[in-house]
Amino acid sequence: MVIEKDRDIINNKKNILITGVAGFIGFHLAKKLIKSNHNIYGLDNLDDYYDVRLKKDRLNQIINNENFKFDNIDISDRQLLGDFFSNNKIDMVVNLAAQPGVRYSIKNPYAYMNSNLVGFLNVIECCRHNNVEGFIYASSSSVYGGNTKVPFSTLDSIDNPISLYAATKASNELIAKTYSHLYDMNTTGLRFFTVYGPWGRPDMAYYKFTHKIFNKMPINVYNNGNMKRDFTYIDDIVDGIISAIKNNYPCEIFNLGNNQTELLNDFIKAIELELNMKAKINYMPLQPGDMKETFADIDKSKDMLNFNPKTNLSLGISKFISWYKKYYNI
């Protein structure tokens, strides 16, 4: 699939590296940046945390574009990553490669150490030694952990993580801040809030709910449905990342969320309405590592990134369901 050009996304031609390019957010970011006149480099190790076919299908949407180059590299492989930077002049890096999932971090902690800490350090070190102009990286709403004050502000403390995943993301922010201080590097951390949309991750609740409701299977709903999330549509997240690339601040952290918290039960109702089917629900207790509520204060993002999420929940779910039916030939 060759994507039509759009020269108005970011000024001045850049060589932009996206790690985790076959992932949900990385793919959508690459797809939009390919419309520009920039050279887009993508790295991914195509691991099997979820169906590798989906990752390859994402890549197939963008792989044939002349200004896109893909390499199968694991960011935890210091030698391979260093060789890549030596062989390619990179101006900006967007580090989206990470081991995702809160509950999985309790079952398989070493996967998070390798990708989220060793891999992160490898990427930021390569940026330092290769004169990269700016380092944009994915953080998470999970860093707010056990905080009870909402909405979550970037001024709030993040010293109370309740999952290993959250701890790795908070560590990323500290490492980036230290590198900005020591080496005068431009770093921007983006705390994503429950991203959803087409080509999403099958381990995410909205994807699993859709699959199970459609196949008349029961869904597990935790904390008896008394959970709230700031569901944020993928296109709005991508716009926020691109703004962070454009601005390339010296050292900042931003929330990227919809600034509207939704009950999980209302989220399920939106899926039911779009599918015209009723869910069979198993209500379950709160799971270790789960947050009861996420809610983004985005005043700083509005002011400094001109971030303005436009997609409400019903529209976003409708777009996801439409893609889901098409992708699975339903």
Image (cartoon, helix red, strand yellow):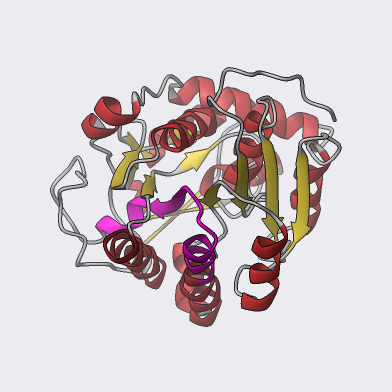
Q: Which x, y percent locates residue 103?
A: 46, 67
Question: In the drawing, does residue 266 fall left or right of residue 25?
Answer: left
Q: Which x, y percent locates residue 310?
A: 43, 19
Asked if the stretch drawn in magenta spans residue 125, the answer is yes
Residue in view at x 57 percent, y 43 percent: 25
Asked if the stretch drawn in magenta spans residue 171, the answer is no
The residue nearer to you, when weighing 218 against 82, is: 82
User: Compared to 114, does 12 lie above or below?
Assistant: above
Q: Which x, y percent locates residue 72?
A: 76, 62
Residue in view at x 49 percent, y 33 percent: 242
Residue in view at x 50 percent, y 62 percent: 101
The answer to whether residue 259 is visible is: no
User: Compared to 106, does 33 lie above or below?
Assistant: above
User: In the figure, residue 249 lies in which quadrant?
Assistant: top left
Q: Quadrant of the N terminus?
A: top right
The residue nearer to you, when weighing 11 against 40, is: 11
User: Compared to 24, does 28 lie above or below?
Assistant: above
Residue in view at x 34 percent, y 37 percent: 263
Q: Find the magenta span and give its range.
A: 122-144
User: In the figure, residue 322 lies in which quadrant?
Assistant: top right
Q: Which x, y percent locates residue 218?
A: 59, 51
User: Compared to 206, does 77 lie above or below?
Assistant: below
